[in-house]
Image (cartoon, rainbow, N blue to C red):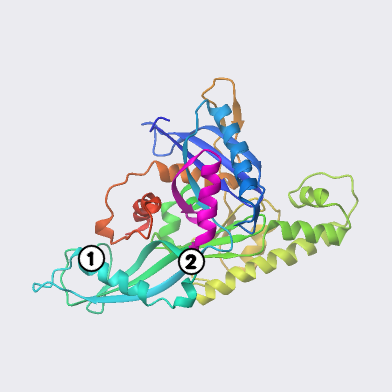
Amino acid sequence: MSSRYTVGIDIGTYEVKVVVALHTEEGPLPKIVGTGRSESKGLRHGYTINMNDVAKSVRTAVSQAEKSSGIQIKEAFISIGGVGLSSINSNGSSIVARADQKITEADLDAALAAAEESIPQSLIQNRKIIYSIPVAWRIDGKNVLGRVLGMKGVKLEVKVLFVSCLEHHLDDLVEAVEEAGVRVIDVVASPIAASFAILSKSQRIAGCVLANIGAETVSMVVFENQIPVSLEVFGIGGNDITNDIALGLKISLEEAESIKLGGITSTNYSRKRLEEIVSARLGDIFELIEVHLKKIGKSGLLPAGIIITGGSSSIGAIEDLARSYLKLPSRTASLNFGSIQGNNGNSKFQIKDSSWSVSYGLCIVGNMPEESTESMGLKKQGKDIFKKVLDIIKQFLP
């Protein structure tokens, strides 16, 4: 496959979505030339419970994307999400080694290693740290913005956001994709991938939270000064809203899903009752987000507010409810790529909703340069599979 193309595979609990994108000189964002989607099987709350079923789902979506794009897909960037994904903040420090007190790469390594070593073992047991993001540096007790390499001081301190996932889930996911005949180039946390497609630079600088309401999970990532400062996933999602509607209105799950998303149905029901049901469950979701924001000291302190994405983000009153619970500006994310012509000359398709943000975000990641991140002090964790992720995280850093 030409290096001018990238493929993103978003493996969600409800659907597998594949985007094939072409990178041109016309603009910074890649042009979509093909898509594929399939029902996701073999996953529960983001966990792989049947690897063969996951592989079949991926194979089906990839086949559709190949047909619409005219491109044979051999490798791709994939997302990882689910309740096994989380972040840990930790602090570390080191004494500058050189006699002239000039900070070197070795000093950065020592501070980052100290931060990782200070994480309680109970928090990372059976987990793999997939990448680390320095959130703040201090030299001799003073905050430093930007790069610290080459500056002078005696003591170097760092606050680090470690993003981790369950190790066996990561291994299972990669194996399932490669069983489907696609080599995994890199793995990116779903909330981080979506942020590239949805958030503007001004939103990341001012401070915001991106919340993705998926079928069985809600993920959130908090940005401040362009840097992701917290990431969390909750075991609740759009399916819970659908189930509540089905039980509350005594209708089928299929009708409940349609009504949830504003569809037309022949069933007579009370609009007031529907609003009560939906508001109650969305309230649970926003309460979880608010509790986490309070935990990290960001409650009511994110000027760019909350941006809501995912399959259930189109629920009518969702912006007003988020604004009420979080006391923040609120809006739903929207992606409109318009009508796109496939490379085979006869395939047209549209992507108009933000549920494609992860797969498209993966393609954006694939187009970013791989130059060294040494000046940012960003350190690779584990296998080479995460090299690209670490290279692109520098986009967040001041």
6 with respect to 316 (left or right): left
Q: Quadrant for residue 284, please give it.
A: bottom right
Image position, residue 98 (x, y; %): 12, 72
Q: Which residue is mark 2?
A: 127
Q: Is residue 320 visible?
A: yes
Q: Residue at x 55, y 20 (%)?
A: 345
| Numbered tag placed on residue 148 in the rendering | 1
Q: Is residue 305 visible?
A: no
Whether residue 91 appears in magenta in the rendering, the answer is: no
Image position, residue 307 (x, y; %): 55, 57
Is 304 rendered above or below residue 112? above
Mark closer to the chain start, 2 or 1: 2
| Separation of marks 2 and 1 at Cα, in angstroms | 30 Å
Magenta span covers which residues? 165-192
Please state which amino acid type lies under the numbered disc 1: Val
Question: Which quadrant is the N terminus positioned in?
Answer: top left
Please state which amino acid type lies under the numbered disc 2: Arg
Q: Residue at x 36, y 31 (%)?
A: 25
Image position, residue 13 (x, y; %): 64, 52
40 with respect to 116 (left or right): right
Q: Secondary structure at mark 1?
A: loop
| Closer to the camera in the image, 119 or 204 | 119
| Numbered tag placed on residue 96 in the rendering | none
Image position, residue 398 (x, y; %): 32, 59
| Closer to the camera in the image, 208 or 133 | 133
Question: How dense is the environment of label 1, judged by Cα within 10 Å: few (below 14), some, or many (20 and up)?
Answer: many
Is 136 rendered above or below residue 73? below
Is 290 rendered above or below residue 309? below
Assess whether mark 1 and mark 2 are in contact (beta carbons under 8 angstroms). Answer: no
Whether residue 191 appears in magenta in the rendering, the answer is: yes
| Closer to the camera in the image, 351 or 7 | 7
Q: Residue at x 60, y 26 (%)?
A: 348
